[in-house]
Image (cartoon, grey):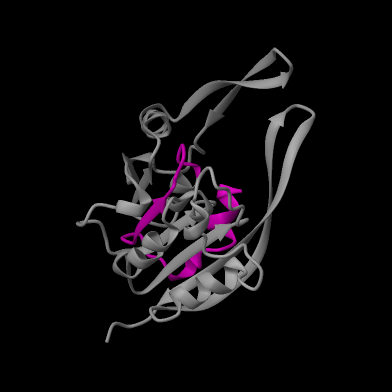
């Protein structure tokens, strides 16, 4: 899924080797490394210090092992590695809150946020920051299944998910003053729970182009 978020959603032909990218909600960095195929500098940000520690380890060593559940208390140890053709030195990681990103961040040629917006306590604050993070003519890529849950986001801060207020339309309306929607698609993905159980979801995804600044 992280590979497809870059390969199917980012218009890579627009990027040059000196392009800069930002991956907000990068987890352990798979999509950040994929952006490094096309961009000279990639910054991955996640709230989880453990995720960032793992991502930095992948920059250093290029691989890791991790236990994965098979069933019950049975586990298997799997190996993960960054594709060797990717230049890991192009990627850096830092901890950060998507709702309160540091003021000196950006702008970037590409900003990616995958499966993030419905896990933020204040998603509107994140959307409102995006115009400052994307260069004029740059790309914003957003994907999410819009699984609103009170444990992550107070209901009064949901951007949709209530009768008459679908999230996709709300997000598009909020972005429209600064971004033009260039592409949208459904992006299915699987999350493994154990060897015989997977969660199947469908993210709504879009690519927007930053409008020229007045």
Query: Does residue 18 belong to the magenta stretch?
Result: yes
Examine the rendered structure and indicate whether residue 140 appears above or below residue 98: below
Front-most of residues 75 and 145: 145
The residue positioned farthest toward the front in the image shown: 156
Residue at 49% over, 55% down = 117
> So how many labels did they put on this image?
0
Residue 39 place in picture, x, y as percent: 38, 56
Q: Quadrant of the C terminus?
A: bottom left
The residue positioned farthest toward the left in the image shown: 104
The residue positioned farthest toward the top in the image shown: 73
The residue positioned farthest toward the bottom in the image shown: 214
Residue at 44% over, 47% down = 25
Residue 157 place in picture, x, y as percent: 47, 59
Examine the rendered structure and indicate whether residue 86 appears above or below residue 23: above
Horizontal relation, residue 195 to residue 184: left or right: right
Examine the rendered structure and indicate whether residue 6 appears above or below residue 135: above
Residue at 68% over, 63% down = 186
Residue 56 place in picture, x, y as percent: 36, 32
Tell me where the magenta segment starts and ends, as one range: 1-30
Horizontal relation, residue 31 to residue 132: left or right: right
Query: Does residue 205 belong to the magenta stretch?
Result: no
Residue 68 place in picture, x, y as percent: 63, 22
Residue at 58% over, 48% down = 149
Examine the rendered structure and indicate whether residue 155 appears above or below residue 130: above
Front-most of residues 12 and 205: 205
């Amino acid at each position: 899924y992280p590979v497809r978020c870059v390969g199917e959603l980012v218009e890579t032909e627009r990027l040059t080797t000196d392009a800069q990218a930002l991956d907000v909600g990068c987890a352990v960095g798979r999509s950040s490394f994929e952006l490094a195929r096309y961009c000279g500098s990639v910054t991955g940000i996640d709230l989880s210090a453990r995720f960032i520690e793992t991502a930095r380890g992948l920059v250093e060593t290029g691989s890791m092992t991790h236990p994965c559940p098979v069933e019950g208390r049975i586990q298997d140890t799997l190996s993960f590695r960054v594709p060797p053709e990717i230049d890991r030195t192009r990627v850096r990681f830092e901890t950060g809150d998507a709702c309160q990103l540091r003021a000196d961040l950006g702008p970037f040629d590409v900003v990616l946020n995958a499966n993030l917006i419905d896990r933020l306590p204040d998603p509107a604050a994140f959307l409102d920051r995006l115009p400052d993070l994307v260069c004029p003519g740059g790309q914003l890529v957003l994907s999410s299944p819009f699984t609103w849950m009170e444990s992550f986001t107070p209901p009064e801060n949901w951007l949709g998910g209530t009768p008459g207020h679908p999230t996709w339309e709300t997000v598009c309306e909020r972005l429209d003053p600064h971004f033009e929607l260039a592409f949208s698609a459904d992006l299915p993905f699987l999350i493994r729970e154990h060897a015989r159980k997977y969660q199947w979801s469908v993210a709504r995804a879009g690519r927007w182009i930053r409008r020229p600044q007045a």
